[in-house]
Image (cartoon, grey):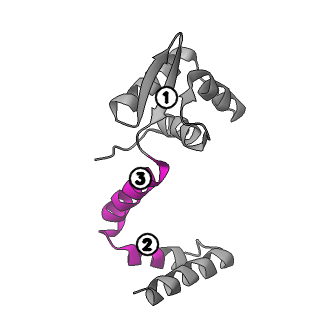
């Protein structure tokens, strides 16, 4: 079971997920947080990374004086789990309820509506 992340943990995971390298260095995360306008104290980041490892999102390997972090949960896996949890909690598992709310609540742009419509048509044809 993939656990939910706090906002700060999610921000770190977005950096890891967005890194094109196989491993992510502590210094890279610090720099990226600062670049996003969310600087973090070294000790705070250590605690957050430790939590992410305890939750099974990251593994760490010490190379000399630096830590290399490797993701264990992909962004897609996390998004899928969180979407299912959201659907179950808010819409009693009904994807139709969610989509209906997006459409009726005027929460989609015209382009998003057309893309969604095309996705549904493609899915219908492939069955």
Horizontal side, residue 22 vs residue 50: left or right: right
Q: Residue at x 53, y 10 (%)?
A: 65
| In the image, residue 88 above or below residue 16 | below
How many numbered marks are there?
Answer: 3
Q: Nearer the viewer, residue 108 or 119?
A: 119
| Nearest to N terminus: mark 1 or mark 3 | 1
Q: Are marks 2 and 1 in contact (CB under 8 Å)?
A: no
Query: Element under label 1?
Result: strand
Question: x%, y% of residue 36?
Answer: 68, 36
Q: Are marks 1 and 3 in contact (CB under 8 Å)?
A: no
Which of the two discs, 1 and 3, sits closer to the camera? 1
Question: x%, y% of residue 46?
Answer: 48, 19
Q: Is residue 89 magenta?
A: yes
The residue singled out by tag 2 in the image is: 98
Question: x%, y% of residue 24?
Answer: 56, 30
The residue singled out by tag 3 in the image is: 77
Query: Element under label 2?
Result: helix
Query: Element under label 3?
Result: helix
| In the image, residue 37 above or below residue 119 | above
| Nearest to N terminus: mark 2 or mark 3 | 3
Which of the two discs, 2 and 1, sits closer to the camera? 1
Q: Residue at x 58, y 71 (%)?
A: 107
Question: x%, y% of residue 108?
Answer: 60, 73
Magenta-tinted stretch: 74-100
Report the residue that reaches farthest toward the bottom: 125
Which of the two discs, 2 and 3, sits closer to the camera? 3
Instruction: Tell me which secondary structure the magenta stretch mostly adopts.
Output: helix
Q: Residue at x 51, y 87 (%)?
A: 121
The residue singled out by tag 1 in the image is: 69
Question: Which disc number belongs to residue 106?
Answer: none
């Amino acid at each position: 079971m993939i656990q939910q992340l706090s906002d700060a943990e999610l921000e770190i995971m977005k950096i890891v997920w967005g890194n094109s390298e196989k491993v992510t260095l502590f210094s890279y995360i610090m720099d990226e947080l600062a670049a996003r306008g969310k600087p973090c104290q070294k000790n705070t980041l250590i605690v957050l990374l430790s939590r992410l490892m305890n939750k099974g999102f990251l593994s760490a390997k010490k190379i000399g004086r630096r830590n290399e972090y490797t993701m264990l949960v992909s962004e897609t896996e996390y998004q899928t789990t969180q979407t299912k949890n959201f659907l179950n909690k808010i819409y009693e598992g009904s994807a139709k309820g969610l989509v209906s709310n997006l459409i009726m609540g005027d929460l989609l742009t015209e382009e998003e509506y057309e893309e969604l419509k095309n996705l549904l048509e493609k899915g219908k044809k492939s069955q």
